[in-house]
Amino acid sequence: MAIKKLVGQVTPEEKNEIQTLFERRNGLNELAKILTADNADLYEKLVKDMGETGSKFQDWWDRMAEKYQWESAENGNWEINFDTCDIYLVTA
Amino acid sequence: MLQYLVILLDKTSTSFCHYKAPSNSPKEGRTLIPLETLRQGIRFGMMENLMIQYVYPDHELPEEYQEVLESIDHSKIKPYGQEDADVLVVDGFQQVKATVPVVLRVTKKELFAHQAEVAEMLADVPRLNVVLTDVETFTEADFEAYKECLTRLAANVERLYVDGKSPQLNLLTDRMMLSQMNNCGAGDTTITLAPNGKFYVCPAFYYENEADSIGDLEHGLDIKNKQLYKLEYAPICRHCDAWQCKRCIWLNRKTTLEVNTPSHEQCVVAHLERNASKELLQNIRKHGTFLPEQEEIKEIDYLDPFDKRDTWQ
Amino acid sequence: MVNKKESLVYEAAGQWKDGAAKNITFIVTKDCQLACKYCYLVGKNTKERMSWDVAKRSIDYILDHKEYFSEESVIWDFIGGEPFLEIDLIDKICDYLKMEMFRRNHHWFNSYRFSFSTNGINYHTDKVQNFIKKNAGHVSIGITIDGTKRKHDLNRIWKTKEGFSPKPEEEKGSYEDVVKNIPLWLEQFPNGGTKVTISSADIPFIKESVLHLYSLGIHEVNINVVFEDVWKDGDDKLFEEQLMQLADAIIDNKYYLGNTCSFFSDSIGKPLDKDLDNRNWCGAGRMLSIDAAGNFYPCTRFAAYSLRSKKPIIIGNVKDGINKNLLRPFLTLDRTTQSPQECIDCEVASGCAWCQGENYDAADTSTVYQRATAICKMHKARVRANNYYWNKLYRKLEMEGQREEFEKNKKKSNDVIC
């Protein structure tokens, strides 16, 4: 059973930033299911955007981890609750 | 509170406002108000303490009407050309002279084309009420043209004041004199009796749909949701200081489907007039003391109060 | 090594972004398998189905006019009749929306939902399931189940094969056809809420129905009494008794932990300041509904099929766009201008809802500025029971030393009214 431990919190502005990226990544993933390479221009735009959004995503977690120095664990995940801005460490 | 009763003496009585009345040809249905209906209407007006305004058609009334018409104190709104009027109505542009107030019903195109002649008329009539018959069609370009037109008219008004005259042009001078809303009052202070013996919010409601009455002489008045004709129940207007605006209930309903809500076009037109009045007041005051008891009209940053609705609460 | 992950707390679309998102509704069909007795859609039919052309032109118009649709987020809402009868069209619409929002770099691509309110009958079908999987991160679905079988089947009955309301002796309830899909729905939407509608005949079943829904695993029960003038003498007393019994059951069995019932809210039943609390209740005019003919409405309730006695209010269409003058009355509506003095002075005014469409439909003149007050006595009964609920619950929590903890974690109940 997964154990979830509250390890910190981000500001609402920081939460908004990751939530927008999260929404965009979801949107891109769902768009990828219906776009094919036939639609060359849009497909190219999508691939580029997925790369950029992924990088921004990673960058957010790196910046926040650096800023807040959250507790971490081997094979653990950090999770954010968009309602509360809380950061959890989830371990198996 | 009800104060005025407009009585249409015929179905083809002249329009003195935004609406179009049926033409005066016998074909289009001249329908004179029955004498008994007129008597009852006058009686109603007496019992309710209402000031009566007769609206005349462009044809002679039978002799026997005169005595009945004169049985109560009243004012007469007549088509231009008729005698013994308290208000004369000119339908479509025509340069006229008169000793009583004149209502000039024109389209925007006519006004823009004849603005110089309209300015000249100011010296020839005690009061000029310009009624634009197509307010609801104004575009952004029309607003610009109207603003320019008002500026030119204001220059004439200013010149007349400097010359010691007191011209009255509803579009420009009313707002300078007012300290609160002074609207048409249809459904609130004024109702209309039509030749069919039924009451209407105003003549336009009668012409648009005869079934849209608010009572009749037999059963009395029955104004449903009558609060909606009052300023306090008009969310946009109660926040507005374009006090000269007619706040036309009929145009409201025609353009927004609600009697208490004006269209964007009606609001902008009224605010262009308000702002031109503001400039005019300031300019006249440069020549000496003028309306000392009146406050300056404030500078505002909108032409449609609707755009400021987020600041109301 | 720490992996990074985010959890999205799924919400009912109505609450999403605290109700600040633009709600755009496609009335994809006016057909439904059911003939619910309380349904306000008086003009349902099998003919008016939205075409792809109308849907596409609507989307193009909306996405072309960002100046009219400046909200940060959007809820693309699909209703009927029963929306899932048109799942092929919906799928095509959603695919087009995703592509177009992305292609046009529209800000809504970062913040959108596809929302459905369904009778649940077709929920399990392959087409609906494939659609859900394809759009998993953006779909919000509410299934309407009214409570126990007898309560549900009292109103939510199948229409006849010929498409009419059945004779009383031929009525067939839809409970079994819906409840079989609830586990699958809850598996996919664990926080899914349901909407329960109460009319006069339903009052005796309120308590059992809410408790039954909790037992099915539905933790959020959004429930309201209909706004129409259907209430009989004594209904308020019966209603109050049902709510008192429900209050006792929720508190005694600790259902308040993890469940909500929108009848109970600690913010209702207070006087409202005529200046400071003057906002309109209803969102009509801030939403946009589109029907099969490509007409735009301020809310679905203003479409012809929803109205008993008034003409529809059409604020534009896909060809000519929105007539902004027709939106002005809706966007300037406030509470006091449309309320009778009795409501303005009411000491238990907060939480008393209204539906702009029903106000219009029931008004003495053609106006949205006359508030219908048919629910007055029902609201007052609700307030009395609600006061009882919170007084009893808070006292219990205080005695148990748990009030602070409860208040911290309390889920906001959702006054969904239409």
Image (spheres, rainbow, N blue to C red):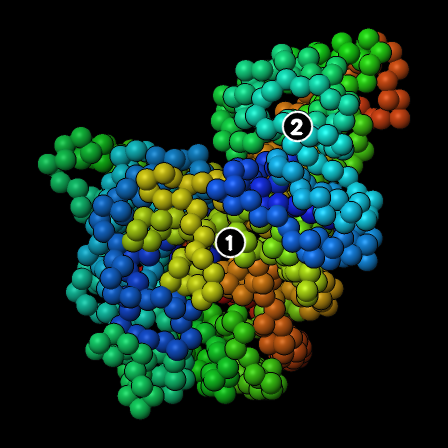
* Residue at point 70%, 57% (across, down): B36
Rendered position, C165 above or below B176: below
Using the image, determine if residue A8 lies above or below residue C398.
above
Residue found at the very far left of the displayed protein: A38
- The residue lying furthest to the bottom in this view is C169
Q: Residue at x 34, y 88 (%)?
A: C168
Asked where in the image residue C180 lies, by quadrant, the reply is bottom left
Q: Name the residue nearer the viewer: C304 or C153.
A: C304
How many other residues sit within 10 Å of disc 1, few (<14), some (14-19) or many (≥20)?
A: some
Frontmost residue, B255 versus C352? B255
Tell me the element at label 2. loop
Whether residue A75 appears in this view of the structure is no
Instruction: Identify the chain of the residue marked 1, using the numbered disc in the image.
Output: C
Q: Mark 1 = which residue?
A: C283
> Which of labels 2 and 1 is toward the front?
2
Quarter of the image where the C terminus of chain B is located:
top right
Q: Which residue is mark 2?
A: B80
Question: Which sits in the foreground, C299 or C278?
Answer: C299
Which is nearer the eye, B119 or A22? B119
In the image, residue B24 lies at what x, y percent?
A: 55, 37
Query: Residue drawn 25% across and 58% down?
Result: C49
Kindly identify the amino acid type of the residue bearing the numbered disc 1.
Gly
SS for callout 1: loop
Quadrant of the image occupied by residue B106: top right
Q: Chain of mark 2?
A: B
In the image: residue C248, left or right of residue C149: right
